[in-house]
Image (tube, rainbow, N blue to C red):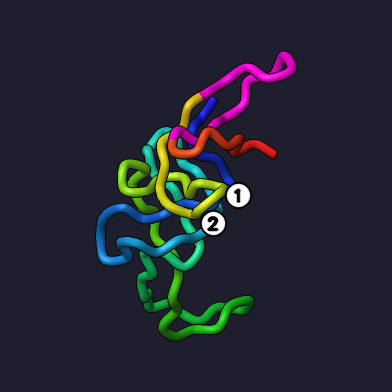
Amino acid sequence: MQKIRKGDKVVVLAGKDKGRTGEVLRMMPKEDKALVRGINIIRRHQRQSQTTEGGIISKEAPIHVSNIAIADPKDGKPTRVGFEVKDGKKVRVAKRSGASIDV
């Protein structure tokens, strides 16, 4: 079971977007990277095609998972993730407050 998953609210710990929060759009476990909405925005030149408009587009670039942390459900600050068994299911728990991340 992964500690960070698609749909989680995360806080950026390092880099140009340090301190900002966003939602995980995609996880890439083999590369240890995550795509986070509104974080690590890059500008790319794109050639026009039949389906897409040409020009300079802005999009999110992947960020390394060591530079992001789960936002605590209670106060929104970065927290580490632990695991507990509740009602026979393994759930993720915030180490900072003890609140369950899986709802």
Q: CA distance from mark 2 to mark 1?
A: 6 Å
* Position in image of residue 69 (x %, y %): 40, 45
**Residue at 57% over, 37% down:** 99
Mark 1 lies on residue: 7
- State left or right for residue 47 relative to residue 51: left
> Label 1: few (<14), some or many (≥20) within 10 Å?
some
* Residue 76 x, y percent position in the rendering: 49, 54
Q: Dominant secondary structure of the magenta stretch?
A: strand
Image quadrant where one finds the C terminus:
top right
Give the mark nearer the N terminus: 2 vs 1. Answer: 1
Residue 51 placement, left or right of 58: right
Is 86 contained in the magenta span? Answer: yes
Q: Is residue 54 above or below residue 77?
A: below
Write down the region rendered in magenta: 83-95
Residue at 55%, 78% in the rendered image: 49
Depth check, front residue: 29 or 37: 37
Residue that lies at the very extreme toward the top in this rendered image? 88
Q: Residue at x 44, y 48 (%)?
A: 34
**Residue at the far left in the pictured view:** 15
Residue depicted at 41% across the width and 33% down the height: 30
Callouts 2 and 1 close, C-beta under 8 Å: yes
Front position in the image: 85 or 54: 85
